[in-house]
Image (spheres, helix red, strand yellow):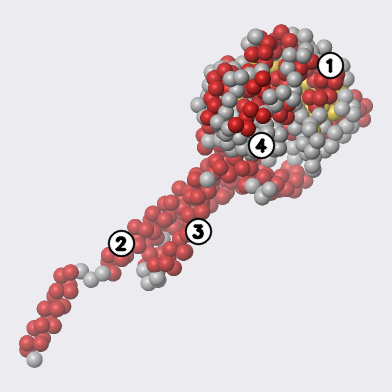
Amino acid sequence: MAVMLIRTFHRLTCGAAAVLALWSSAPALAATPAERATLSPAAVDRYLDAYLAETGLPGAVVAVTRGDEVVHVAGYGRTAGGAEITARTPVPVASLSKSMTAMAVLRLVEAGEVELDEPVRRYLPEFTMADPRAGEITVRQLLNQTSGMADSAYPDLTRPQPDTLEEAVAAMRGARLAADPGTAWSYHNPHYFVLARLVEVVSGRSFAGYLADEVFGPLGMADTTSVDTTDAMPERARGYVRAYGMVFERAHPRWFTAGSFGVVSTGEDLARWLIAQRDGGGVVSPAGVVLAHTPPEGEHYAMGWRTSLPGEEPGRIEHTGQLLTQNAMQTLLPDSGVGIAVVANTGMIAGDDAQLIADGLVRLAQGETPTVQRPFSMTADPVLAVLTLLAIGLAVLGVVRSRRWARRAAGRAWWRTTLRLLPYALPIVLFVELTDLMGLALHRQGTLSQLGYAWPALLIWVVGTAVAVAAVLAARGVALIRVGRTSQPAPWSASSSIGSEACSSRSQ
C-alpha cells in the first residue's frame, strides 16, 4: 500500500523523537535486577509515576497478572471530573470489549446453540443488506472481521447513531459489502454490533444481561457492565485530547457502543479478565480460548484479539481500544504467562498512552529497564505548530505584496499566471480531501469534527494553511483586477485624443 499521510508523518516524527531521546527523554527507571525479574508492584508504580510526570497524562488504570496471580492493580492520577483514579474506578475499555463479545459468542457455540461456520441469517434473520452476498456471511467471519463489510462501504461513525442493537442492525439494510465474504480482512465495528444482536436473539436476553450473567459473573467481574452509548459511560466518557504538548479536557460526542466498544470495567476486574485468558475461567473451555486467540491462516486478527504484525515484537496477543477521549490496551505474553491491561483518559492518535505504557510494562516483564516513550504527537505537534505559523506568516506577506505581484503578472500571458497559482490550490485540496485521506491511512472513516479530537494540531495546520492560501489567492485576484483597470485608458482620455487629432487635421 502507498504510504499514507499519517503513517509517513508518524515515521518521520518517531525518528525525530529517537534523536531527541538522546538528551530529552526521561531517565531509565532505577530498578534492581530482582525487581525487573519479578515485575514487582514497586517497579510498576515507579514506571507509571515517571510516565505521568514526563507526558502530562492526566490518569490511567493498570492491571498486571502472571499466570493465575495478580501482580499489581492500581489507578493513577484523576478523571476528567476530578475524581482520584483507583483500582476500582470504572473506566471505558473501548474496543477491548470485542474480545468480551467474542467470549459470549463462543459460550453459545460451546453450548451447541450457534455454529461458527453457519450463515448469520440462520440465527439472525433480521440481518439483511443491500447486497446478496451478505447471505453468505458466517458467524466466524464476523468474529474474524473477514465478512466483506468495511468502513469504506458503510462508515458507521459518520452516520446517525442508533439507540439499540436492533436499530444498529436494521440501519445496515441499505449497505453493501466491500469484498466477497471470507476474502478480505477489514476492521469494522458493525461486525460486533451484529454479533451482540445475535447473542440477544439466540439467548433471549439483552446483550448486557447475557454478559453479566454468563461472562462477567462467572469470572468475578462484578463491577463490569456493558452500555449502549457513550452517554451511559462514567462522566459520559469525558476525557482529554493532546495538542502542542498539553492536554485539554473535552466531552465525548454520543456514539453507539454496544457489542463493539461499550464495556465499562475496573482495574481489578481487568486483572480477572486477563487471568481468564489462560483457560477460559469456566466461561469457555481452554480450547475456546485458543480459538479466540488464533487468527485464520495468513491473517493476524483472531476473535477480538490480534497477533503481532510483521515488524512488531513477535509472541504477543493483544488488542487496542480507542474512543475520542479514552484509549486502552490489553496484551498477553504467552511464553511468560504475563497479562497487561491499561486504560488511559486521553483519546486516539494524539494520545496513544495506553499502548506506550503497555509496551513499557512488557519490557519490564522481560527483565529490561524501560524508559518513558512520549506519544508521537508530543514531537509532531511542535513541528505542525511551526508549519502553521509559517503558513500564516507567508500568507500575510503575500497579501501585503499582492499589488506588487499583480503588476508583474499583468505583463505575462494569462495561462502562465494561472500555472504559477496552481500549486497554491494544493492545501485547499488537502483540506477538502482530508477525511478521505485519513480514512485511507487508518482504514476508518470519520469526520472533521472527530479529527479535531484525534489530532487537533494536524487539523489546525491543514485548516490554517488552506485559509492562508485562500487569503493570498483572493488578495492577488483583487489586485489583478485593480491593476487591469488602471492600465486601461479612461474613455474620456480616448475621446479627447481623437478630438485633438481631428482639430490638428483641419488646421493643416
Closer to the camera in the image, 401 or 150 = 150
Q: What kind of residue is marked 3?
A: Pro
Q: Alpha-carbon distance for marks 1 and 3?
A: 61 Å
Q: Would residue 245 be found to the left or right of residue 143 on screen?
A: left
Q: Secondary structure at mark 3?
A: helix
Earlier in the chain: of badge 1 and badge 3, it is 1
Earlier in the chain: of badge 1 and badge 2, it is: 1
Residue 145 horizontal side relative to residue 481, left or right: right
Label 1 element class: loop
Q: Is residue 476 above or below residue 27?
A: below
Q: Label 4 sits on what residue type? A: Asp
* Spatial separation of the CA atoms under disc 4 and disc 2: 59 Å
Residue at point 17% right, 74% down? 494
Secondary structure beneath label 4: loop
Looking at marks 4 and 2 on the same chain, the residue that comes earlier in the sequence is marked by 4
- Whichever of labels 4 and 1 marks the residue nearer the N terminus, that label is 4
Residue labelled with disc 4: 180
Which residue: 75% across, 32% down? 301
Q: Is residue 277 visible?
A: no
Rendered-image quadrant of the C terminus:
bottom left
Nearest to N terminus: mark 4 or mark 3: 4
Tell which residue pokes out farthest to the left in this image: 506
Mark 4 vs 2: CB contact within 8 A: no
Residue most extreme to the bottom: 508
Q: Which residue is mark 3?
A: 423
